[in-house]
Image (cartoon, coloured by chain):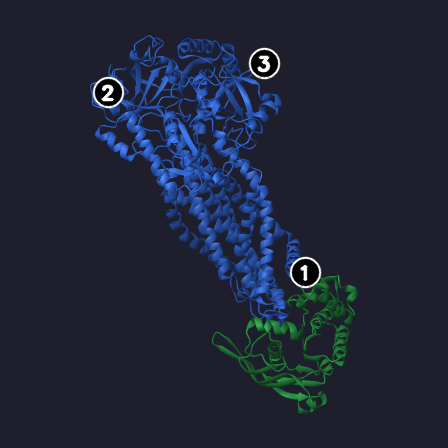
Chain colours: A blue, B green
Amino acid sequence: MNGWMQDVQYALRQLRKAPGFTVTAVLTLALGIGANAAIFTLVNAMLLKNLPVSNPKTLVRLGDNSNCCVGEGLRDDGDYTYFSTGTYQQIKKNAPEFEELAAVQAGFEYRPIVARRNGNQTEARSMMGEFVSGNYFRTFGLRPYAGRLFTGSDDVAGAPMAAVMSYEAWQRNYAGDPSVVGSTFWINTKAVTVVGIAPQGFYGDRISSTPPDFFLPIEAMPVLANAPYVHDPAVPWLYIIGRVKPGVALPSLQKKISGVLRQIFISSNGFTSASDKVLLARTHIVLTPGGGGIQNMQDQYASHLRLLMWISGLVLLIACANIANLLLVRGMARKTEMSVRAALGAMRGRIVRQLLTESVLLAVLGGVAGLIVAYAGTRMLLLMAFPGAQNLPIHASPSPAIIGFAFGLSLATGVLFGVAPAWITAKAQPADALRSGTRTTATGATLLQRTLVVLQAALSLVLLVGAGLFSQSLSKMKSTDLKLNAKNRYIVHINPQAAGYSPTQLEALYRTMGDRFHALPGVLKAGIALYTPMEDNVWNTGVVIQGQPYLDKGASWVRANAEYFDSVGTHVVMGRGIGVQDTSTAPAIAVVNQAFVKTFLKGHNPIGQHFGTSDANAGDYQIVGVVEDTAYHSISWKDKPMYFLPMTQEPARLLTTQIEKDESLYAGAIVLQTSRSMSDMETLARRTLAGINPNLSVVKFQTFDEQISDQFTGERMIARLTMLFGGLAFLLATIGLYGVNAYTVARRTSEIGIRMALGAERRNVVAMVMRGAMMQAGLGLIIGIPVALFCVRFVKSQLYDVTGTDFRVLAVAVCALAISACVAGLIPAQRAASTDPVKALRTE
Amino acid sequence: MTENIIEIEGLTKVFYTDEIETHALSGVHLKIARGEYVAMSGPSGCGKSTLLSIIGLLDTPTSGRYTLNEKEVAGLNFADRSRIRNQEIGFIFQSFNLIGDLSVAENVELPLTYRAGMPSAERKQRVQESLERVNMAHRMRHYPAQLSGGQQQRVAVARALAGSPSILLADEPTGNLDSKNGEAVMKLLQELHEEGATICMVTHDPRFAAHAERQVHLFDGKIVAEGELSQLMAQL
């Protein structure tokens, strides 16, 4: 122990003695370790961390994908992840292997609620509410922070309406006011009692940038959200997560649950046709670990995070190579010291230990500094990945896991970059202690030093190529013609359903909205739609053209008002768009896009054709116009058939029976086109809506540009980070190349002096040094090019419209590295050429 | 009969570089008795430093026998040689070879830190005693750069003494010192010898060689003359 302490003390003294080296190495390591710790913070929070609940390892989720949110029909792949209320209850009844089985609303993020505390608050707030089963908190083994959590009796039709507020919402909006518990809130205009506060740190059953502020019982949903599908056996909308009893074998349970699901399908649908039987045979549920909760966000970000882990790992490797090189240089300078130590009886292992202590100490210092970089880096990453997210349950401050990771990484890197220099330095011959000077001219850099530089050059080329491909991908995404016009357009997301409107009141509401917004100076168009382009929402259905056989193909559809197409910049190419005359009482019409015509009506004049969602109602909508194809759900949305229906129209057969159940009648957004840029548009929109109804709150306000830009969030983050890491790797490789060349020149000063004394010209010396530098860079390129081409295949799926073997990118990366090698070689070469042979020989 | 601490028979050392063979030592026979003070001299390149390296287990012979304290050490591996060197041999180098980053006390303590199991208190005590022996205890917290050449060499002697070695090996200990400091160091070695230390010193300065009881003269890798200075002069 005493020896270790001495080693540490001596190591600290060594580092203090060489502040330039120490600062350079610590900063390099801080960047490398910090970048890795920052990425690991996200990986840990999103991919590794369990929900903050009791014994998360025994939680099991029914389903293995992120399909969402309210569906209909059977799945072709037979893999089910979300379920109807009836299916949940049947599974719960037939699976006693679960201690508890809870159901949660699959897509609560898309329909925020409007909440207002009774009496205290004048303005209603748009907040997140998640409908959950009565045993939700019991399943997670949670205790309330205040009040109580749900019991089974809360989740019964007709029960007094209760809500549990999240701790975060309680603190954020009500400053932890204890009187919130037991008080009445108006949620979606209905009186609800907040019975308790969820435990601190509990953010729901999944990581979300908009975690729930309120938890509400499923049976309250028909009243609070007027959702018609809550008890519809054909509409899945719930995720299921449960806690299995000890000793239950999951494979057999999975088989049993899949059997139960098939049985439910048989009893509800019959499954008599041949195609139904095929679908039934495929029907299954995959049980997955539920400790991490619902993994939708994880599924979305996992590949990005894995890629970033690789990239930051490579940068750290390059940083390690740089520091290993620095240590080798220091090792050479300390050769005499090591010889003396050996002469005094130090064994090689003891010297290695001493030197490794120095490297590990250096790495630990780098790790500590890296935590600061990690904190800043994580904040930057969170801002890049979740722009505008207020309540994200991922924190940048280092947790024990992150500190442990940084410390472990520091130790590993300390050993990684320290072991070779330590071993080489420790091989100092004790007999050298007797020699006061060298007897021959010193040689240049060692093979290991050169190898490290070649490795750095190769790795930095790989990262540069990656950075080039991702930035090219982002650039192509940004320059894609979406056939949308975002200039002077604003998107106001609303939820009239939460404001208490019934479907029959909507036509008048939309008319009022149009009038009020048109009354604002500068507003040219006020489009109203179920959802808008590039907002991560899409409604799909099957399509049957009247008089044609069913093609087993579907289309996406949107409800919109008469000004909608103009407001988003979509052009009508045939017939007409939706008009003001297309009211709820007018015959049901539809406007389709070009891809719809190509898919379902090739060779026919679409105008006047009828279609519906099934054989039985193929005459529901008459096509009156065709609009051009536009990107809708994402940038890569191409050639997707779409149709547009008037905001409040229903086919005649549904007018009397279905209108109250039709959630699609509720507009999700208003698109405002203005004559100029209006910075106060959000305030005006809020005021206008509040003027119509105080409960009509703004769920989200963005410019259309921002909404489109949000679609590139992941790609932008990857492109920026790969560029950042690629640049860093490039810089480190250049420094490494320069360092080795400079060191070589310094070591060969006497040799160069002798050469010059023997008649070598300055250009010969420059050429000699440059040859060495270019040789290393060249070898790096020879190794790096095939590796880069090989690695591209692993990121190809994350690139947009980039083939993966883009030779322009490769050429730019190769040129950049070649230029850096020239610069890194030229400075030491010039220095070598200016060597005074007399002085050089005297020094020797 | 006097006990020999070192017995060398037929020792050779050949250096191989590319296609050149350099015979640094060719059949050296040498015995050093416990308590003896031997000076090795000879012209540059005669092999005296090579012989000292082999005696000090810094290097290994190409052939021949070498017995240190009645133990055959010629064929030992690196680790065993390190251990014996640490316990049995004290080095005094021409260029002092103090470690600049360590204080005087730490430099003296350094060989003791390589001995497994020696308690810290014992190390401190030995350091204190060694530095007192060379009259450098008052500078124990200083660093080598703060000392004169003579003082540095005295610290180097203290370092060599700290481990209570069987033999002190000195390689041109006055080579980097002025005559006054050189004389002081030689006086110190003389005193140590009188207290019973075995010393083997390489020097080419006859004035300093005269301090030794016996001189060994090397030429072309061989011992060509041996005896007291007067005898040696006669032989030569």
Rendered residue at 33%/35% (across/down): A258
- The residue that disc 1 covers is B101
Quarter holding the N terminus of chain B is bottom right
Callout 1: chain: B
Secondary-structure class at tag 2: helix
Q: Could you tell me which secondary element the residue under label 1 belongs to?
A: loop
- Which amino acid type corresponds to the residue marked 1 in the rendered image? Asp
Q: Are marks 2 and 1 on the same chain?
A: no
Q: Is residue A176 left or right of residue A266?
A: right
Q: CA distance from mark 1 to mark 3?
A: 75 Å
| Quadrant (top left, top right, bottom left, bottom right) of the C terminus of chain B | bottom right
Please tell me which residue lies in front, A750 or A472: A472
Above/below status of A422 relative to B22:
above
- Classify B74 as above or below A312: below
Tell us which disc is closer to us: 2 or 1.
Answer: 2
Q: Is residue A557 left or right of residue B222?
A: left
Q: CA distance from mark 2 to mark 1?
A: 90 Å
Q: Is residue A166 above or below residue A414?
A: above
Mark sitting on residue A119: 3
Q: Are marks 1 and 3 in contact (CB under 8 Å)?
A: no
| Residues tagged 2 and 3 counted as in contact (Cβ below 8 A) | no
In the displayed structure image, the side of residue A458 where residue A20 appears, left or right = right
Give the mark nearer the N terminus: 2 vs 3. Answer: 3
Q: Position of residue A326 (x, y in %)?
A: 56, 55
How far across and down, in percent of the image, does residue B156 sit? 71, 70
Gap in Å between the C-alphas at discs 2 and 3? 52 Å
Splitting the image into 4 quarters, where does residue A378 fall? top right
Q: In percent of the image, x 25 and y 21: which residue is there?
A: A544
Question: Where does label 2 land, which residue?
Answer: A615
Name the residue nearer the viewer: A322 or A394. Answer: A394
